[in-house]
Amino acid sequence: MKSIFIFLLNLFIVFCLFSIATDHLWSLDTFSIIRNILCAGLGLYLSYNAIRIYALKKESPEQGLIYRVVGKLQIYFAKFYTYIKPVQREFLIWLGIAVGIGFISLVLVGIPGAFLISIPAWLGLTKELEGDGVWPAAILVSLLWPISLPVGVLIKYRLKQQGNEKYSLFGFIGTVLLAIILSTLIGIALAAQ
């Protein structure tokens, strides 16, 4: 049963990669060419992997790419879990707050992100943003910056581990402010296109 699931997962990933590569026009800009070549190469490798393991029975399923990736992810998850164990409650609280802010931002259709994007224009640092790209950029900004809340908890914990307990709160606040600034800059760059 597990090998059938992995086989279907391989086929689904191949389908997604080929649909990404063929759904978009094969334009001549460098990024599109590189993206399409990588998608096609990864899709062909996964197809080869699925056929060699499941159709031809040349290798055991444990030698496949998906098994190796899942095995590595399990190892990293176990290491991450042991790392956050002392601050697990605080981490989960801030993760819940971040998810709540992201959900509210989606319900408000990116209004918090639009506010963040418009601050540099109010200060006279950029021109007023207009056009069809502002709304998706505002939604992206609304979803990006809350990710810094659980990351800030990990940085705060790391500073406490290193004996810099006085600066741990500044590390948390600095992480959140840096994420707000970076997500705003990303939003401005996307909206200006």
Image (cartoon, rainbow, N blue to C red):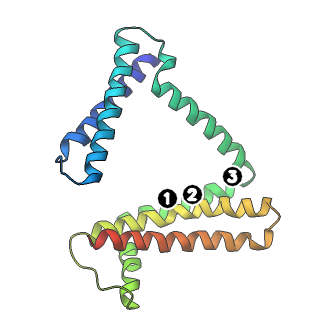
Q: Secondary structure at mark 1?
A: helix
Quick one: which residue is furthest to the top in this view?
Answer: 57
Q: CA distance from mark 3 to mark 2?
A: 10 Å
Residue at 73% across / 69% down in the picture?
Answer: 168
Front-most of residues 19 and 85? 19
> Dot 3: within a 10 Å radius of its alpha carbon, few (fewer than 14), some, or many (20 or more) residues?
some
Report which residue position mark 1 lands on.
99
**What residue lies at 78% left-to-right and 63% top-to-bottom?**
160
79 horizontally vs 96: left or right: right
Split into 4 quadrants, where in the image is the C terminus? bottom left
Name the disc covering residue 95, or none. 2
Residue drawn at x 80%, y 61% is 162
Q: Position of residue 133 (x, y in %)?
A: 25, 69
Secondary structure category for the residue under label 2: helix
Q: Which residue is mark 3?
A: 88
Disc 3 secondary structure class? helix
Q: Compared with residue 33, is residue 153 higher up or lower down, i.e. above or below?
A: below
Lower position in the chain sequence, tag 3 or tag 1: 3
- Which amino acid type corresponds to the residue marked 1 in the rendered image? Val
